[in-house]
Image (cartoon, rainbow, N blue to C red):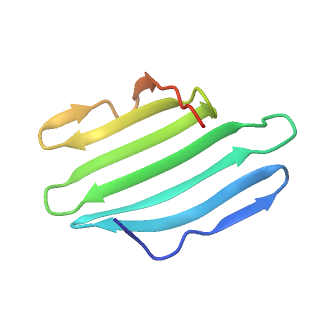
């Protein structure tokens, strides 16, 4: 996985990851996101990845969103004949433990 640069900024009560291009083999994509630090949405994460593999036409959209300790992972796309709904993503609740 290669990223040219990841730019983090802090402002307006949020930590932001500016859109960053990513590559891995024939895959090309973009990663972006934010996390609330204060105000109305402290500790709320919103991380997005969109990627495409040009040779086979595979697509993948990933979103991790929600409270920091209990975000929901959403997956959508088309991978090697397996089609995930683009407009109705699969929702997978996960639990993060920070030590």
Residue at image coords 54%, 31%: 96
Q: Residue 20: percent from the left, percent from the top? A: 51, 66
Total labels drawn: 0
**47 is higher (above) or lower (below) than 27:** above
Which of 74 and 59 lies nearest the eye of the viewer? 74
Image quadrant containing the C terminus: top right
Figure quadrant of residue 7: bottom right
Return the residue found at the far bottom.
4
In the image, is residue 3 above or below residue 53?
A: below
Q: Residue at x 29, y 57 (%)?
A: 52
The residue lying toward the viewer, choosing from 93 and 98, is: 98
Q: Furthest-front residue in view? A: 99
- In percent of width and height, residue 39 lies at 87, 39
In the image, taking residue 94 as reference, residue 35 lies left or right, namely right
Q: Is residue 12 left or right of residue 92?
A: right
Q: Position of residue 87 (x, y in %)?
A: 40, 31
State the quadrant of the N terminus: bottom left
Residue beneath the point at 55% across and 56% down: 32
Quarter of image, res 2: bottom left
At 21% from the left and 34% from the top, the residue drawn is 83
Front residue of 56/40: it is 40
């Amino acid at each position: 996985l290669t990223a040219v640069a990841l730019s983090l900024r802090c402002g307006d009560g949020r930590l932001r990851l500016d859109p960053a291009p990513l590559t891995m083999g024939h895959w090309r994509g973009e990663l972006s996101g934010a996390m609330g630090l204060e105000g109305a949405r402290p500790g709320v994460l919103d991380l997005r990845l969109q990627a495409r593999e040009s040779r086979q036409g595979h697509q993948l959209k990933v979103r991790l969103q929600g409270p920091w300790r209990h975000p929901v992972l959403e997956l959508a796309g088309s991978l090697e004949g397996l089609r995930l709904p683009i407009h109705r993503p699969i929702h997978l609740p996960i639990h993060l433990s920070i030590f």
